[in-house]
Amino acid sequence: MADPVRIFEVGPRDGLQNEKAHIATRDKIALIDLLSVAGFDRIEATSFVSPRWVPQLADAAEVMAGITRVPSVGYAVLTPNLKGFERALAAGADEVAVFASASEAFSLKNINCSVEESLARFNPLMAAARRAGIPVRGYVSCALECPYSGAVYPSAVRDVAGALQEMGCYEISLADTIGRAPPEATRAMLAAVLGVIPAARLAGHFHDTSGQALANVEVALEMGLRVFDSAIGGLGGCPYAPGAKGNLSTTALVSMLEDRGFATGLNRSRLTEAERLVAELAQEKEIEQ
Ligand code: HMG
Ligand code: MG
């Protein structure tokens, strides 16, 4: 086997945040519990964002209280500001993630402030996380294309990723939020970011709108990245990114990686069970897969 690749499961958060149908808290908990025994070391379970902005995850505290924690799994949550961090801490999150955008237009639509303001807003959160000993991951949204303003310069991604690293994020996940990036664009973006951040601290987060997510993973693997985000059942999208479809499906990613000799440490039959639950929910609720 070649080097191990770590998969960061984001389905319960990035997947379920976008569902129009109401997903019951108990179903979210059941999904996380199935994923918890599949071998992931990190699962992004929910978001402590404003419930007015993302009503689908308004039950974040109940979800965190209801899951059966597996000690080897770190339960991560998304936090946009200090208030979100305090809620996450009270709910027992093991780590949190902040999210900035490489596009001004998306930043305004998604978190109602400029990119610079968003980075400044993370400072008190980072300080509180340091005091509490909670690791912080950083996302750069629209690292390739913005649903509102089109192509994004690699230098803009490099600058935002560099700022997140500087403020103390232990890993930066570079996101193709709308999932339309061709592999050549991913290569150019990664080349710019690798000028300021080593591959060991980067992750790829590819949505799969135009079916190129796996090709983008291939490019990122070639360039040295060994962490990828994906969602069980290909769930996902962002309510503030029109046209964004699901995340790269976890099982598709596992198959591709293992075919190429990369170990993932994941149990396929457990993943299939979790995928089955997503399919059942999809049938019941017409959620998007
Ligand atoms: P705002 O309205 O500008 O902020 O929202 P505000 O500070 O004026 O707060 C408004 C109200 O929300 C206040 O309540 C606050 O207390 C409350 P009121 O006094 O009016 O009753 N509030 C909160 N409540 C609970 N938890 C909080 C919180 N913060 C404020 N944390 C804000 C600004 C950032 C809060 C809002 O825009 C927001 O929550 N946005 C989140 C949007 C979101 O979650 N988008 C999807 C995730 S990003 C994504 O999917 C991309 C990613 O997957 C990578 C990729 O693919 O690109 C990560
Ligand atoms: Mg996403």
Image (cartoon, helix red, strand yellow):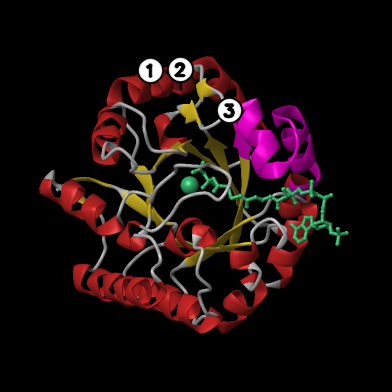
Which residue does the numbered mark 2 point to in the structure image? 192
Query: Which range of residues does the magenta coloring cover?
Result: 100-125
Q: Is residue 192 magenta?
A: no
Callout 1 crowding tier (Cα within 10 Å): few <14, some 14–19, many ≥20: some
Q: Is residue 124 magenta?
A: yes
Q: Residue at x 29, y 26 (%)?
A: 183
229 or 283, which is in the foreground?
Answer: 283
Q: Is residue 284 above or below residue 104?
A: below
Q: CA distance from mark 1 to mark 3?
A: 15 Å
Q: CA distance from mark 3 to mark 2?
A: 13 Å
Under circle 2, the secondary element is helix
**Residue 188 image label:** 1
Callout 2 crowding tier (Cα within 10 Å): few <14, some 14–19, many ≥20: some
User: Considering only order in the chain, which callout, 2 or 3, is on the residue closer to the N terminus?
Assistant: 3
**Residue 279 image label:** none
x then y, percent, for residue 106: 61, 34
